[in-house]
Amino acid sequence: MLNYKSISLLLLVAIFLRPSAGEVNSIYISSKLDPNAIIITQVDIVFVYDQDILEKFPSTKTAWYSNQRRFISEAGDKIDLVSVFIPQGFDSQSVSLPQRGNDALKAFVFAQHDDSEAPPIDISSFERVRIEIDEFGILVSRQN
């Protein structure tokens, strides 16, 4: 029979063994665009490991894509970038994530199929991420 102390200990173990909020463990991407359209959307997932880089992080989609090469070069190993090219009507069960992704201070998503002034979407607090692309832009949410 479990007593109060046993139950408390089990709860503590479960909390510490469970991935913490802020660890992106999986990303699922789908496109709801017309399969007959000829559209490919680039989705960039950026894992940031350094506070100085966070302070310099691009604030819009345009700022990211127009200065991407320079930013990546200057950031070096202080970021990891995962770029995925999604054709219309595409489903992906899993995006390959960097091994050290769970050490990131923040993780952000940019997508070319979005408003030019769209800010990066912070997914740091999501364990399982769902990214849907449709004719209006992108929707990022927690996947159940």
Image (cartoon, helix red, strand yellow):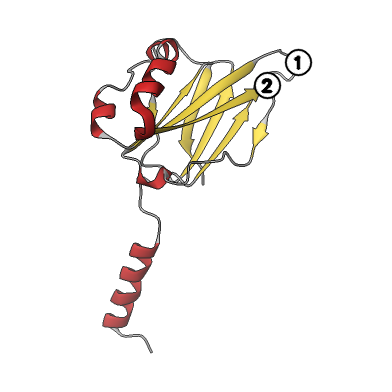
Task: Name which quarter of the figure residue 115 lies in.
Answer: top left
- Count the marks: 2
Left or right of 92? Residue 66 is left
| Residue shown at 36% from the left, 42% from the top | 125
| Residue shown at 51% from the left, 47% from the top | 144
Furthest-right residue in view?
36
Question: Counting other residues with Cα less than 10 Å from the Cα at mark 1, is it few (<14), some (14-19), or many (20 or more)?
Answer: few
Question: Counting other residues with Cα less than 10 Å from the Cα at mark 2, is it few (<14), some (14-19), or many (20 or more)?
Answer: many
Whether residue 98 is visible, yes or no, is yes
Return the disc, 1 or 2, that comes first in the chain's sequence. 1
Disc 2 marks which amino acid?
Answer: Gln
| Residue shown at 32% from the left, 18% from the top | 59
Task: Name which quarter of the figure residue 95 lies in.
Answer: top right
SS of the residue under disc 2: loop
Residue 128 % position (x, y): 48, 44
The label on residue 119 is none
Residue 17 % position (x, y): 38, 64
Furthest-bottom residue in view?
1
**Label 2 sits on residue:** 88
* Quarter containing the N terminus: bottom left
Task: Name which quarter of the figure residue 136 lies in.
Answer: top right
Disc 1 marks which amino acid?
Answer: Asn
Is 30 rendered above or below residue 13? above
Report, in whole angstroms, how far the alpha carbon at label 1 lies from the one at label 2. Answer: 8 Å
**Label 1 sits on residue:** 36
Circles 1 and 2: CB distance less than 8 Å? yes
Is 4 rendered above or below residue 143? below
Residue 135 % position (x, y): 59, 16
Whether residue 64 is visible, yes or no, is no
Residue 29 % position (x, y): 58, 33
SS of the residue under disc 1: loop
| Residue shown at 66% from the left, 33% from the top | 91
